[in-house]
């Protein structure tokens, strides 16, 4: 299994500013993912981040709003740009297990973002 | 779209058995996952099914019928700590799609 950490764990930000969330995995993984989860709701995939290529965004999410970096096989960042109160959510990073068993995903603890 | 459906909420009594159902679109199906998520915490992996049948793991079992696009998670001997959201997720092609989640409340 993979152990994933995220920073910051929570933040309160002003409208119009940007926040970069960091995700660190304790082992090399090919595929990393960024999700958003509104309170009491399920996970919505924002994008898939593969090392060495541009991130692949899901419908409704664009690179200008959510730029992603994937500089190596253990690290990724998600930036929430020009924030508005509608961006208040929990942002979760995950990585595919990569051990050839189930391709299950392991999740970080999440970043709770509040935009005022 | 890629629809995955689960009941929104369920309630059961400590010591009982509960079955949480999940239906999914079958196009491009590559596997079905169940995750548990306690409030304020990250989801944790419970089970994986890719072939028809029942996979048992302790108090938790997961069933899959590929032809029907149907799965269920069975929880036996319920404990208070089992109160959580249970997320069904289907691997459709290379896309990991989560269902809305079922919030389970275990009552004493």
Image (spheres, rainbow, N blue to C red):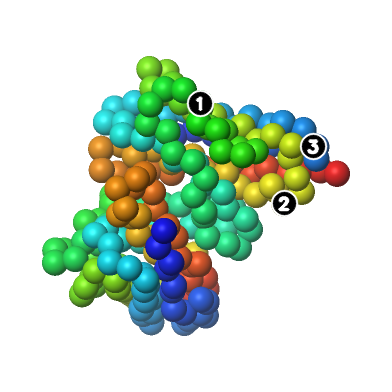
**Is A27 placed above or below A30 here?**
below
Q: Which residue is mark 1?
A: B54
Circle 1 sits in a helix, a strand or a loop, which is it? strand
Q: Position of residue A39 (x, y in %)?
A: 57, 58
Task: Classify mark 1: residues with Cα within 10 Å, few (<14), some (14-19) or many (20+).
Answer: some
Picture quadrant where residue B18 is located: top right
Q: Position of residue A11 (x, y in %)?
A: 51, 79
> Is the same chain shared between marks 3 and 1?
yes
Q: Nearer the viewer, residue A87 or A94?
A: A94
Screen quadrant of the N terminus of chain A: bottom left
Q: In the rendered structure, which disc, 3 or 2, sits on the residue that comes first in sequence?
A: 3
Q: Which residue is mark 3?
A: B15
Q: Position of residue B7 (x, y in %)?
A: 59, 33
Q: Which residue is mark 2?
A: B81
Q: CA distance from mark 3 to mark 2?
A: 12 Å
Picture quadrant where residue A61 is located: bottom left
Q: CA distance from mark 2 to mark 1?
A: 24 Å
Instruction: Give the residue drawn at x 50%, y 67%.
Output: A109
Between tags 2 and 1, which lies in front?
A: 1
**Is A56 placed above or below B108 here?**
below
Q: Is residue B2 visible?
A: no
């Amino acid at each position: 299994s993979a152990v994933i950490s995220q920073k910051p764990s929570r933040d309160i930000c002003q409208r119009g500013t940007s926040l970069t969330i960091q995700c660190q995995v304790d082992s090399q993984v090919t595929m990393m993912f960024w999700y958003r989860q509104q309170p009491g709701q399920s996970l919505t995939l924002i994008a898939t981040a593969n090392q060495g290529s541009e991130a692949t965004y899901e419908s409704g999410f664009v690179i200008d709003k959510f730029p992603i970096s994937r500089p190596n096989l253990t690290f990724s960042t998600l930036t929430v740009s020009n924030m508005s109160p509608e961006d208040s959510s929990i942002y979760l990073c995950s990585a595919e297990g990569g051990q050839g068993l189930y391709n299950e995903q392991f999740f970080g603890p999440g970043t709770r973002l509040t935009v005022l | 779209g890629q629809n995955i459906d689960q009941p929104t909420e369920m309630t059961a009594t400590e010591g009982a058995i509960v079955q949480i159902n999940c239906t999914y679109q079958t196009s491009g199906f590559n596997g079905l996952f169940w995750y548990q998520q306690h409030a304020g915490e990250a989801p944790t992996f419970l089970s994986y099914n890719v072939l028809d049948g029942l996979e048992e793991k302790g108090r938790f079992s997961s069933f899959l019928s590929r032809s029907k696009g149907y799965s269920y998670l069975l929880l036996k001997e319920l404990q208070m700590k089992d109160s959580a959201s249970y997320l069904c997720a289907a691997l459709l092609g290379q896309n990991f799609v989560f269902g809305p989640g079922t919030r389970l409340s275990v009552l004493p």
